[in-house]
Amino acid sequence: MDRLGPVRIARFTAGDDPAYGVVGGDLDQFGQPAEDAVVVELSGDPLYAGIQPTQTEHRLSDVRLLAPVIPRSKVVAIGRNYRAHAAELGNDVPEEPLMFLKPNTSVVGPGDQVFYPTQSERLDYEGELAVVIGRICRDVPPEQATDVIFGYTIANDVTVRDFVRNFYRPPVRAKGWDTLCPLGPYLVEGEIADPHQLELRAYVNGELRQRGNTQQLLRGVPELIEFITGFMTLEPGDILLTGTPRGVSHVYPGDVMRLEIDGIGALENAIIAESPGV
Ligand code: MG
């Protein structure tokens, strides 16, 4: 297969078991494939088997996209990694990376619905660059960080904000509620442009609410990988959320969140009221 430019990997279903595929065709200005794009099915899981195309091809419009990766063990997320975002919530910049985990049960895919928790009065979107780990790794020096990265995608670190500020409600609920980690639409392999030069925007119901650039990250991707792997093994398919820029705000049932990162794509999810007992 030609390897012109970055490879976009979709995880999808055409009605049967989930499969992976490489998305082909022209891209629009957001890195989204054209209407007539196709997806060439891969043999196995590219995180383990590499990119091995089969003869099977689908029209992209005929398949349902799924989260491009379900983390094998964890989503590691970094808080307050943009100075202006820390300030907008009245927080200082932490002396060392502020970390939390999101369980893989919080992951949903492009177009999936996000539940608005019945106990929340403030649910916020957070648009973030997500790093997908490609190799089992520990104690990774920053200069070798790119060796353990498989690629990048977009994450929405949806947050039950009213659960963050109460000591008796630790972030495991604020951040770990089912459906509060939309990922997608594609896993963009390897060398996208510099991951520290990416424009990020968030829209709610079509209105631009958040705009930032990953060059504003207080700690870049190599430094974060060094810090995390200094005490925790990362495995293929684990995800690192790099933090959100200034411009988070509330969303409500019925709202549609759209996150864009140039060169990666757009991730859209609607919010619905969580039905009691779900
Ligand atoms: Mg966040």
Image: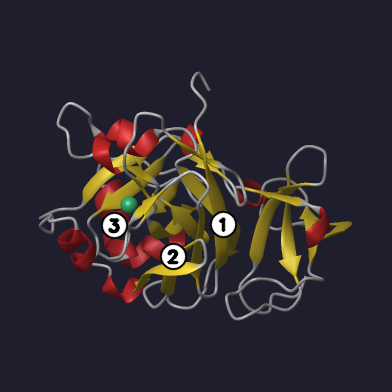
Q: Is residue 34 above or below residue 236?
A: below
Q: Is residue 246 visible?
A: yes
Q: Is residue 154 above or below residue 74?
A: below
Q: Looking at the rendered structure, which numbered label has been put on residue 155? A: none
Q: Position of residue 221 (x, y in %)?
A: 34, 63
Q: Characterize the local packing of mark 3: few (<14), some (14-19) or many (20 or more) Cα atoms within 10 angstroms.
A: many
Q: Position of residue 24 (x, y in %)?
A: 75, 70
Q: CA distance from mark 2 to mark 1?
A: 10 Å
Identity of the residue drawn at 13% across and 59% down? 93
Q: Amino acid at mark 1?
A: Glu
Q: CA distance from mark 1 to mark 3?
A: 27 Å
Q: Which residue is mark 2?
A: 202
Which quarter of the rendering shows the N terminus? bottom right
Identity of the residue drawn at 75% across and 75% down? 2
In the rendered structure, are the residues bearing label 2 and label 1 in contact, judged by CB atoms less than 8 Å apart? no
Q: Which residue is mark 1?
A: 268
Q: Which residue is mark 3?
A: 224
In which quarter of the view is residue 40 placed?
Answer: bottom right
Identity of the residue drawn at 45% across and 62% down? 147
Between discs 2 and 1, the one toward the N terminus: 2
Q: Position of residue 125 (x, y in %)?
A: 39, 53
Mark 2: secondary structure = strand
Q: Amino acid at mark 2?
A: Ala
